[in-house]
């Protein structure tokens, strides 16, 4: 069992800060660049996983993170930037960051979308001073080739996560513990 110490926490926070500094290739063009990447991510997701169109039509809002970079070697971290969309409109921009310690080796990049299925979940997310993904997050799984599966338990969840387009290998990856914070691009 790995015990988190102040030193390990500080090192993990430092790793996350370094990832934040590299900006994940999103660039410094502000909101327009993030919006363009969000549009492309949604096009890819809808064409590759058609079932997500149904989730999107039922969702009160979606947080789209086009590119999250995650690295780990005992101490790990991740960082990405994206946009919160209500309908077809971007209403806010967010960063996603996490730090972790324990058995983890490797690096990966991926996209993910959080579907806020209830007005209450969306309101809690927007009103919060940073929101952390936790046990209340349900995952829609890609376990049948290119088919996306959201079972009846998942579809009743207030927030559903779809993680896709993984590149690289990292053991122990999850969105749990990821903190989302509003940013000004």
Image (tube, helix red, strand yellow):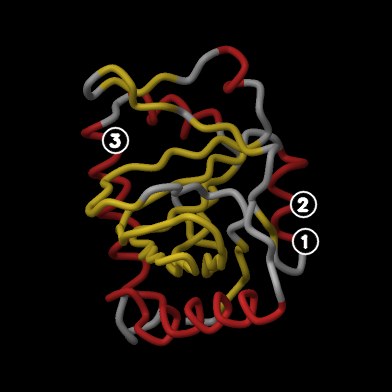
Q: Nearer the viewer, residue 143 or 156?
A: 143
Disc marking residue 46: 3
User: Tag 2: Cα neighbours inside 10 Å, few (<14), some, or many (≥20)?
Assistant: few
Image position of 32 (left or right of 114): left
Image position of 126 (left or right of 88): right
Question: Label 2 vs label 3: CA separation?
Answer: 26 Å
Q: Nearer the viewer, residue 154 or 15?
A: 15
User: Tag 3: Cα neighbours inside 10 Å, few (<14), some, or many (≥20)?
Assistant: some
Decide: marks 2, 1 in contact (CB < 8 A)? yes
Residue 148, placed above or below residue 81: above
Q: Residue at x 30, y 58 (%)?
A: 109
Label whose residue precedes the other's in the sequence (1 or 3):
3
* Tag 2 residue: 124
Q: Residue at x 43, y 67 (%)?
A: 80
Question: Label 2 vs label 1: CA separation?
Answer: 5 Å
Give residue 76's position: percent from left, percent from top: 47, 67
Label whose residue precedes the other's in the sequence (2 or 3):
3
Q: Nearer the viewer, residue 112 or 121?
A: 112
Quarter of the rendering containing residue 141: top left
Q: Give the mark count.
A: 3
Disc marking residue 127: 1
Give residue 169's position: percent from left, percent from top: 27, 51
Callout 1: SS: helix
Callout 2: SS: helix
Q: Residue at x 61, y 40 (%)?
A: 116
Decide: marks 1, 3 in contact (CB < 8 A)? no
Q: Residue furthest front?
A: 1
Q: Nearer the viewer, residue 56 or 113?
A: 113
């Amino acid at each position: 069992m790995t015990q988190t110490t102040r030193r390990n926490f500080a090192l993990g926070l430092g790793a996350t800060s370094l990832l934040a500094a590299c900006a994940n290739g999103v660039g410094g063009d502000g909101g327009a660049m993030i919006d363009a990447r969000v549009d492309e991510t949604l096009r890819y997701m809808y064409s590759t996983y058609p079932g997500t169109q149904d989730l999107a039509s039922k969702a009160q809002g979606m947080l789209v993170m086009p590119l999250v970079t995650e690295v780990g070697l005992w101490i790990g971290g991740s960082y990405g930037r994206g946009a919160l969309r209500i309908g077809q409109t971007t209403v806010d921009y967010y960063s996603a960051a996490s730090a972790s310690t324990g058995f983890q080796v490797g690096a990966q990049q991926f996209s993910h979308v959080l579907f806020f299925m209830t007005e209450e979940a969306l309101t809690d997310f927007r009103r919060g001073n940073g929101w952390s993904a936790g046990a209340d997050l349900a995952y829609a799984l890609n376990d049948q080739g290119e088919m996306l599966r959201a079972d009846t338990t998942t579809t009743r969840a207030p927030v559903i996560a779809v993680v896709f387009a993984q590149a690289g290998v990292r053991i122990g990856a999850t969105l749990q513990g990821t903190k989302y914070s509003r940013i000004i691009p």
